[in-house]
Amino acid sequence: MSQLLQNVVGELSKLPGVGRRTALRLAIHLLRMDREEVAQMTESIDRFRNEIRYCARCNNLSDEEICPICADAERDHTTICVVEQVADVLSIENTRQYRGLYHVLGGLISPMQGISPSDLKIDLLCDRIAAGGVEEVILAISTSVEGETTLFYLMNRLRQFAGLKITSIARGIGFGDELEYVDELTITHALRNRREIE
């Protein structure tokens, strides 16, 4: 294999979810593309990496100091949905069911990986709430061990704000899942979050 091709495959395979075979297919596809298209792609990636910012309010990705969601006067500024990563904002936005604001933690508490609460944007969240106007915080954190640890820590931190409503997204058994293959933690959440059938 050409050294240039090996270099490209090596770089592409550093992306999450991209193995060497997929990286090779992508590299071959790049060869088939027009030079202008490849140049435009690499320029976009370079500009993205060098010019992207994090919103000063919510830590979401933005082209400006304040992201479009935080700047949108039509959104409900009394509700903040706390998520782990920027990708979670996109997932929730794609449902078109939520019209409040967000707060991106930038990860989860994980002592095994050396990530402590001070490494996350928890103080920024508390500062937003302390500034006033926030009535509800929705914790939309993953159900992993690290997620549960982060959820517990956040709930303890947020209890200092009198009158603040703290909620969590419903957790439970997914549609189509068979009960015998569902883990105990998920079943526990499903039982706690049960609702009356109308």
Image: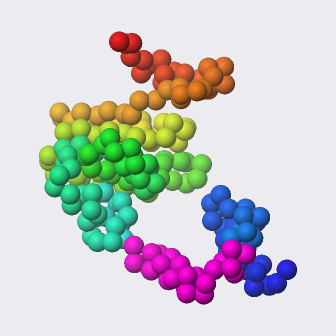
x 82%, y 84%: residue: 2
- Whether residue 156 appears in this view of the structure is no
Q: Nearer the viewer, residue 145 or 26?
A: 26
Side of 68 where 188 appears, left or right: right
Residue 38 percent across, percent down from the top left: 58, 82
In the rendered image, the vertical position of residue 167 relative to residue 192, given as above or below: below
Side of 181 where 110 appears, left or right: left
Q: Nearer the viewer, residue 34 or 109?
A: 34
Side of 157 where 118 appears, left or right: right
Q: Nearer the viewer, residue 167 or 170?
A: 170
**How many marks do you count on the picture?**
0
x 51%, y 21%: residue: 188
x 66%, y 19%: residue: 180
Q: Main secondary structure of the magenta part?
A: helix
Quadrant containing the N terminus is bottom right
Residue 27, by quadrant, is bottom right
Q: Which colouring convention does the figure follow?
A: rainbow
Residue 131 percent across, percent down from the top left: 16, 51
- Whether residue 196 appears in this view of the structure is yes
Residue 81 percent across, percent down from the top left: 32, 44
x 38%, y 44%: residue: 95
Residue range (magenta): 27-52
Residue 115 percent across, percent down from the top left: 51, 53
Reply yes or no: does residue 56 show up in magenta: no
Quadrant containing the C terminus is top left
